[in-house]
Amino acid sequence: MTVELGQKTILVVDDVPENIDVLDGVLHETYKVKAAVNGQRALKIAASDNPPDLILLDIMMPEMDGYEVCRRLKEDERTRGIPVIFVTAMNEVEDERKGLELGAVDYITKPYSPAIVQARVKTHLTLKATLNNLEHLVDLRTEQLQKTKDATILALASLAETRDMETGNHIRRTQRYVRVLAERLRMNPLYQEQLSDEVVELYYKTAPLHDLGKVGIPDEVLLKPGRLEPEEFEVMKNHAALGRQSLLEAASAMGHETTFFDVAGEIASTHHERWDGSGYPNALKGEEIPLGGLLMAVADVYDALISKRVYKPAMTHEEAREVIIEGKGSHFAPDVVDAFLEVEDRFLEIAAEFRDQE
């Protein structure tokens, strides 16, 4: 890996102007040199829109010594990444230990050796540039892996969708309904801690897999052009358990972080459970049902109601809204219904943006 340094900026901090002049003389041909004669000024320069790439910091200064300056630099998110080299007449081991513990990367003692100053500065600028490049590569790889993961999720969800030709953009709409509901529900104090940004995003990413188990339903049931007979409906109900089982097997194969598959499995298994315990596959009741399942229940039913099927016409939003309200406390969690009513305009927007093509 080649690291390009370019012209870097060095901030020299010393209360003695003559010492600043010496270091400027050593460095100015290679670097842009800024100076500060006290700690406050140094902190202001370091936190500016044009921060230095490295700081040469004297320890013995009035009002705020170098140790305190370094401590404050490392506490500030804007400046903690700037390498600090202490430059001082102090040469006790304890002094060096204290400086390194505060986050300094090196220690140069006076009187200065120009060759040592130049070598140490170049070394630490190179190390910082290398670290920045590595962090950038890690960020790129992480982004690529996330995109691959997202694409795989949609491919799996679409596999179930292609077997059920009437679902159209169902998975795209429902995952967005779930996110909108979750974002609104966390305004309720009862759910603020439970619905962190990470959890909301997890529900959004896993929601498309809620009907994954349909790939295990026989064609004569899944593709029947009409309402199912009671015995056929019993077969169809198996898709909830089949989806969970598939996702649990995926989690087991991973052998480490399984949160994603656990949540996906919960949603697949519980989005047909009902608040009053009359749902399937396990007749869970009330708060026994995971929150992801409660959110998906409203999203899934609403989308089914407003979608045209061979055995029924599409309902209007107002008609579907009344069905959701009627199911409050029986089919659906009351708090989730309340959240739905507060964001129904967003549901309309999502339904329009991802409507099925005739």
Image: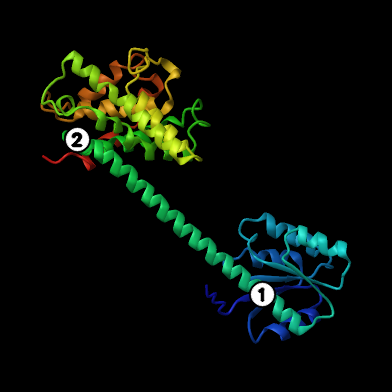
Secondary structure category for the residue under label 2: helix
Q: Amino acid at mark 2?
A: Arg
Residue sitting at x 38%, y 40%: 205
Q: Which is nearer the N-term, disc 1 or disc 2? A: 1
**Which mark is in front, 1 or 2?**
2
Residue under the point 37% across and 51% down: 148
- Image coordinates of residue 337 in percent, x first then y, are 35, 23
Which residue position is annotated with label 1?
123
The residue shown at (80%, 79%) is 19
- Residue type at mark 1 is Thr
Q: Are marks 1 and 2 in contact (CB under 8 Å)?
A: no
Question: Residue 68: percent from the left, percent from the top?
Answer: 78, 59
Residue 63, above or below 142: below
Residue located farthest toward the right when viewing the structure as drawn:
92
* Label 2 neighbour load within 10 Å: few <14, some 14-19, many 20+: some
Tell me where residue 276 sits by quadrant: top left
Is 110 on the left or on the right of 29, as rendered? right
Q: Quadrant of residue 353?
A: top left
Query: Which residue is label 2 attached to?
Result: 163
